[in-house]
Image (cartoon, rainbow, N blue to C red):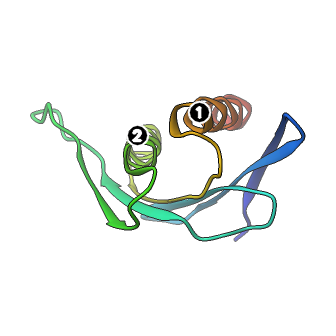
Amino acid sequence: MSFLERTQEYKGVLFHLRLLTLENAVIAFFYEGEMKLGTLAVSMPMSVEESVSRSSVLLGGRYMVASRILSERLSAHYRKMSLVSFHSTHPEAEALRIYTGILNDLIQSSN
């Protein structure tokens, strides 16, 4: 069991994604610089009948939207429950754009 990792530099800051795939779940850490725990969101994959995502923020008050979006994206792609930790010092929209790009790169390279 090992992490998949991607890094991108933006304005002198290193943005990281570390992803661990388990048999029944994926766990992802999105962070800048040193690895930190941030806002935690969990998501379950949607069934065919559902039109609303099942996700929730478990811990944290900042970046709630971004952490849920990334958790839902992972859950939909891997068809497993996902747990996302999101930590950033940048504005939420800017950080989400950068981390979404890193996640897209990781998904494309693993296919």
Residue at 60% x, 31% y: name it. Answer: 94
- What kind of element bears circle 1? helix
How far apart marks 2 and 1 lie (CA) works out to: 9 Å
The image quarter containing residue 32 is bottom right
Q: Quickly name the residue at label 1.
A: 100
| Quadrant of the frame with the N terminus | bottom right
Q: Percent position (x, y) of residue 23?
A: 49, 65
Earlier sequence position, callout 2 versus callout 1: 2
Quick one: 13 or 77, which is closer to the camera? 13
Residue at 38% x, 39% y: name it. Answer: 76
In the depicted structure, whether residue 55 falls above or below residue 21:
above
Q: Percent position (x, y) of residue 2?
A: 74, 67
Callout 2 touching callout 1 (CB < 8 Å): yes
Crowd rating for badge 2 (residues with CA inside 10 Å; few <14, some 14–19, many 20+): some
Q: Percent position (x, y) of residue 10?
A: 82, 34
In the depicted structure, whether residue 58 falls above or below residue 108:
below
Residue at 47% x, 62% y: name it. Answer: 39
In the depicted structure, whether residue 110 falls above or below residue 37:
above
Q: Percent position (x, y) of residue 19?
A: 64, 56
- What kind of element bears circle 2? helix
Q: Which amino acid, mark 1?
A: Thr
Q: Quickly name the residue at label 2.
A: 69
| Quadrant of the frame with the C terminus | top right
Crowd rating for badge 1 (residues with CA inside 10 Å; few <14, some 14–19, many 20+): some
Task: Check residue 18 in the rendering and tell me which mark sits there, or answer none.
Answer: none
Quick one: 74 or 38, which is closer to the camera? 38
Quick one: 103 or 88, which is closer to the camera? 88
Q: Which amino acid, mark 2?
A: Ile
